[in-house]
Image (cartoon, coloured by chain):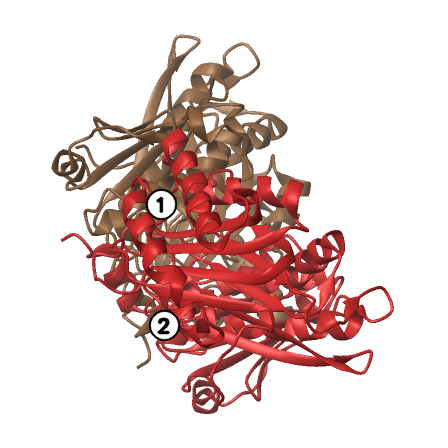
Chain colours: A brown, B red
Amino acid sequence: MSIFRFAAGFRSAAGRCGLKASGNPDLSLLVADSVCTGAGVFTTSLVKAAPVLYDQAVLAEHASEIRAIIANAGCANACTGAQGDAAAREMARLAAEAVGCEPHQVLVLSTGVIGHQLNVEKVAKGVAAIAPELSVEHAPALAEAIMTTDTRPKTSSATAVIDGVEVTVAGVAKGAGMIHPMMATMLSIVTTDAAIDADLAQSLLREVTDASFNCVTVDGDPSTNDTLLLLASGVSGVTINASNIAAFRQALEIVCIDLAKQIAADGEGATKLITITVDHAPSIAAARTVARKIACSPLVKTAIHGGDPNWGRILAAAGVAGVPFDPSHVELWLGEVQLVAGGTPTNYNEREAASQISGQQVAIRLNLGAGAATGYAWTCDFSAEYVRINADYRT
Amino acid sequence: MSIFRFAAGFRSAAGRCGLKASGNPDLSLLVADSVCTGAGVFTTSLVKAAPVLYDQAVLAEHASEIRAIIANAGCANACTGAQGDAAAREMARLAAEAVGCEPHQVLVLSTGVIGHQLNVEKVAKGVAAIAPELSVEHAPALAEAIMTTDTRPKTSSATAVIDGVEVTVAGVAKGAGMIHPMMATMLSIVTTDAAIDADLAQSLLREVTDASFNCVTVDGDPSTNDTLLLLASGVSGVTINASNIAAFRQALEIVCIDLAKQIAADGEGATKLITITVDHAPSIAAARTVARKIACSPLVKTAIHGGDPNWGRILAAAGVAGVPFDPSHVELWLGEVQLVAGGTPTNYNEREAASQISGQQVAIRLNLGAGAATGYAWTCDFSAEYVRINADYRT
């Protein structure tokens, strides 16, 4: 595997500023060499962290003038009121000063403990220390500096030949659960060297999110800080438009799905990546709804953790997803083994069924017999370690 | 505490017929001395067990002619196709024969493993053995014979003076999770010696369910078999009508809420009963939606298990419930300690906050600052023991 790089036109830097009690890297900058286009998808929670509200305001007015992203881990800057809003603005101002641009050209990401005020003095010192280090070589360091309880950094890139030119999409993500104590979860930054209009970037990012990050669940709890940002530098000389968007969309989707699956596989306490496919559904949205409902079921996730092919739990979860189907038309596969046909159990071999969930990758496929659409969800198994991580932090 | 009895006009019997591998009691009969009114509320899952479909058909046509309920544990008779439907009908026929009534006067309840065919020969022998034992004294035995992984039987009764006469409402319930392996969960039978029109009974039962059983969650997974039945014998001589329904409704609600809380407290692996109160909400339905969303959060439930007052998780869960409120108006209490005012943390004492969740009863109160309505949810904490129960059954 080659070393991860962002798309052409971006440099980054990362370091320690003391926000993480562990002393691990917790501050990073991503800087575009010149003005680029930004788009963002944010948590749907009513309880939004200060940097989420700040970024939404920036993108509403200045999506075509973005120059940088500043990101910290160790403090979510959520439920922090007016003081938190001021801290997010101050982070943007510090980055703008270091980069030589306006604060409204900077986006802000925070992740970590909810309900603690952000120490902006630490951030100021940190920015001063890392800004001189900006380089294309520090992309892996940025992926590490946004981690919280993630056990490994998450990076992905893909290329597409568009109008005869190779265009790159390259991104990073973090997220493992809502985490000890009161951590706030998913962040992702995706870059490209294509040029793309801000409105088109925004609508494309939203669509691709529905097919990728929105299909992941670790514990069913969206956080206050969930953010996905796309920055497009245009350095490749290729401009995305209606006639060439399909190839770009595919590359973006490959990167986002890859990052989404990495998040699921690295869920708190996880030992297995579970892919749930729901097909023959009335619509893609319906298929995804059923897949996510199954992916959110603690009963399904504990059974798979224990190596028990408890298919009744999968059907029970599907039945309450709010999507209409006829249970007597349902087929269910675990890996290569068909467990259910016409809504009732096949004569499957119990040991063979159990062997389908013994590895690190588990595939569940549910045929609803109610249409032609397919959707996916990715999750992890549910272990006693998850409970330990989330229960025993302070005791 | 006095020994539990159903309302006047009902006798019961319970015993073993070999459906439970443990050899514990698994078959029971509840018989009305003469024809009574029945009402039922059933699982909202599309995947409905055979007895659920059977009971819905009976109540649609014969709600005023009910004579008996036959219930088994150890086999859910769910995902069993046409053979399962025939087995449910056969259970009703066996009970009708023993009681001396028509099969369409009998309601059927099943709970246990999903996807296994019911052994009706065992049921036939069991009915023959227990039918001669029908007695008012065997009500506690019925509560025990419907248990699956419940650790204790659940009974409750209340009285109301209506039109100068004391009327009794008395019921039993079971349910602890969706249980090993593929058990199907909540059953409840409530009896009364009042007389009540079938349509009025049905609408009242549905309303009271929304305020009681529908506010309980152990793991957020509704089962294929969830059933609540109300039988009204009329033996008290009191008929419920528009002018006296308030007192009857209150007694019914007391019994249903009491049973619902017993189910939550006996959730799989539970060590604590958690009561979530959401007030100043735009409507009762909205308050209950937010309360249930908090009650379903594994992050909230693991934190409380670990004695960690992680209030950020409570606000994060409330924020994604789909109910509009302004986060900056929110107040949050844990027991007697106010943690959040105006959406930001108070200067609470960390140790004092932790002490509010150290006992067997935990109270969370969230003031949404968005109206005048109040709603409740009841759940239990989430322990490593839950994962063990649900993961390690076959390994």
Nearer to me, A235 or A364? A364
Q: Which residue is mark 1?
A: A313
- Image quadrant assignment for residue A358: top left
Give the chain letter at badge 1.
Answer: A
Q: Position of residue B221 (x, y in %)?
A: 44, 52
Q: Alpha-carbon distance for marks 2 and 1?
A: 20 Å
Tell me the tag on residue B270: 2
Residue at the limit of the structure toward the right, as seen here: B243
Q: Residue at horizontal 42%, vertical 59%?
A: B219
Query: SS class of the residue under badge 1?
Result: helix
Tag 2 subunit? B
State the image coordinates of residue A198 (x, y, percent, origin top left). 60, 30
Q: How many labels, in total? A: 2
Q: Report whether residue B176 is seen.
A: no
| Residue B190 seen in the figure | yes
Q: Residue at x 43, y 27 (%)?
A: A328
Which sits in the foreground, A89 or A376?
Answer: A376
Q: Amino acid at mark 2?
A: Ala
